[in-house]
Amino acid sequence: MTKRALISVSNKDGILEFAKELVALGYEILSTGGTKKMLQDNNVAVTAVDEVTKFPEILDGRVKTLNPMIHGGLLGKFDDASHQAQMNEHGIEPIEIVCVNLYPFVETISKPNVTWDDAIENIDIGGPTMLRSAAKNHQYVTVIVDSKDYTNVLEELKANSATTIETRRKLAAKVFRHTAAYDSYISNYLTEEEFPESLTMTYELKQNLRYGENPHQKAAFYQKRLGSDFSLAYATQLHGKELSYNNIQDGNAALQIVKEFEMPAAVAVKHMNPCGVGTGATLEEAFDKAYEADQTSIFGGIIALNMEVDAATAEKLSHIFLEIIIAPAFSQEALDILTKKKNIRLLTIPFEQAKQDKFNVVSVEGGLLVQEPDRYGFSNADIKVVTDREPTAQEWEALQLGWAVVKHVKSNAIVVTDSQMTLGVGAGQMNRVGAAKIAFEQAGEKAKGAALASDAFFPMSDTVEAAAAAGITAIIQPGGSIKDQDSIDKANEYGIAMVFTGVRHFKH
C-alpha cells in the first residue's frame, strides 16, 4: 500500500524540501491550489485532491477537501477491522501524514484598511477541519502545523520508517492549540459585545524566564500578537542580560506612567510604584528631577524616558546602578557610554504608537478580572475649585503633575509634587493618613508650598490636617465623601486651595 501525505500550506517556508524528502521516502503527495502548483513547478510529483475525491473544487475554492474520501483517510483507524472494511468498501485510502497551515487571517486583519470581505475570505474552514481530524487520529496519523517540526519528523521517518507515538501526541496537542488560537482571533474580530458571554484570548510564547517573582517559581513571558506595540512584549533590547519577571512588571509600570507626558519626562520605578518622576525643558533636566526626587530608592530601579537618550543624560545614568533603561531611542554616543556597563538592559519602544489595549486583564485564582484601562486624565476631569482660594498658576502645574502620577501608584496613594517633579510618594497603605505620612516624610522640607494628589476622596478631614502641618498649599482629590465639607472647611481654615475632579484613581 502506498504511503500518502497531504500537504496544503499558505506559509511555504521549507515545504519544498520537506515534500522532496517525503517523496524520496516513498510517499505519494496529495495537494491543492497554490501548494500543488509550487510543487509541480519544482518537479515534485503531486496528486491533486480532486483526483482523490472525484469532485471538483467549487465555490471559489471554499469547498475542496471537505469530502469523505479525505476525512475517511484521516479518521480511519489503521488497525480496526471494521474501519478498514468500510474504507475498502468505499475505496478510501489512509493518509499517514498531514502538513497544513491556515489561511493568513491574522496577517490579513493586521493590514491597514482591510475590508470586511477580505477578512471573511481569509477564514479557513477546510484547513482546521483536516488538522483536527488528523490530530484526533494521532494514534495513526502524523500531523504538522509548524514548519519547525519538519526536521524532527523527517529524522524519525528516516530512522524508523514512522514517527513515535510521543511525537505524534505532541504534534496533535500543538495542532489543537493552533486551531484554538486561530478561532479565538476570528471570534474576537467578529465580536462586538463589550464583555461577551465567554472570553478567549491568545498569547504566544516570547521567552522562558529564568524564574518568576522568586527563584523557586518558574515563569514565562507571553505576548499578544495583535496587542499594542507600545509594550515590553515588543521592545527591542539593545544591550544587557535577559529580562526577568520582575523587570517586566516594573518596566511595564514605568511605561504606563511616562506616556502620560508630552514634555521631556523621566520616571523611576521600584516594585511597580514610581519612586521619582521628573519633567523639564530637556531630558537631562527631567532625569535630574527624577533622581533628586528619591536618590535612595532609584538604586536598582527601572528608568523610562520619553525622548531619545543623549550623551549628557547617558553620562548621568551611567553613574547609578540601574536594571533597565527604556526609551524611544539612544544616540550612538549614549550607547557608547551605557554599553560599558555589562548587565544593564537597554530597551527601545516605539513611543509614537503609545496606546493601551482594549482591556486590562488580571488573573485571580480560578478566573480573570477584565476591565477597561484607566484612561481618565486631567483634561477629562470635571474640575471644581471647592475652597475659598483658587490655586496659583504654579500650583495648577503641580496639581496636574500629581494627578498624572497618582493614578499609577498602588492604593491608598498620596503623591506630593511641585510643578516639575514628585517630592514624596506614599503607596499601598491601608489608610490614607498613613500614605500621606510616608509621602510627607519623604518630601521633608520640600513639602512646604507643594501640592498633594490623592487617588480617592478623604473620608474625614485628618489628611488635610496632616497636609497643612507638612506645609502643603494645594490639594487635588476626587471628592464624593459624605464628609467632604469637613475637608473643605479644614482646607479653608489653613488657606489651602483644594480641587475636586469627580473621579477616583484606585489601583490595586
Image: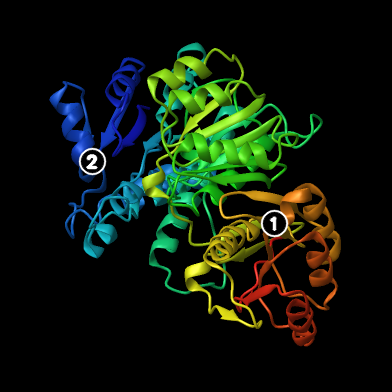
Residue type marked 1: Val
Q: In this orientation, does residue 408 appear? A: yes
- In the drawing, what numbered circle is on residue 92? none
| Position of residue 77 measured from the top left corner of the image (x, y, whole percent) | 52, 42
Look at the image and tell me whether residue 67 can be seen: no
Looking at the image, residue 120 lies above or below residue 351 = below
Number of numbered callouts drawn? 2
Q: Residue at x 40, y 41 (%)?
A: 350
Determine which residue is flagged by label 1.
416
- Mark nearest the camera among 2 and 1 is 1
Q: Residue at x 52, y 19 (%)?
A: 338
Number of other residues with Cα within 10 Å of mark 1, as a class: few under 14, some 14 to 19, many 20 or more:
many
Q: Which mark is residue 32?
A: 2
Q: Nearer the viewer, residue 56 or 465?
A: 465
- For this rendering, which residue is in front, 476 or 96? 476
Q: Residue at x 56, y 25 (%)?
A: 316
Residue drawn at the location 29% of the way across and 19% of the way down: 20
Q: How is the image coloured?
A: rainbow
Residue in the foreground of this view, choosing between 301 and 52: 301
Q: Secondary structure at mark 1?
A: strand
CA gap between label 2 and label 1 equals 67 Å
Is 94 situated above or below 403? above
- Element carrying mark 2: loop
Report the amino acid beneath label 2.
Thr
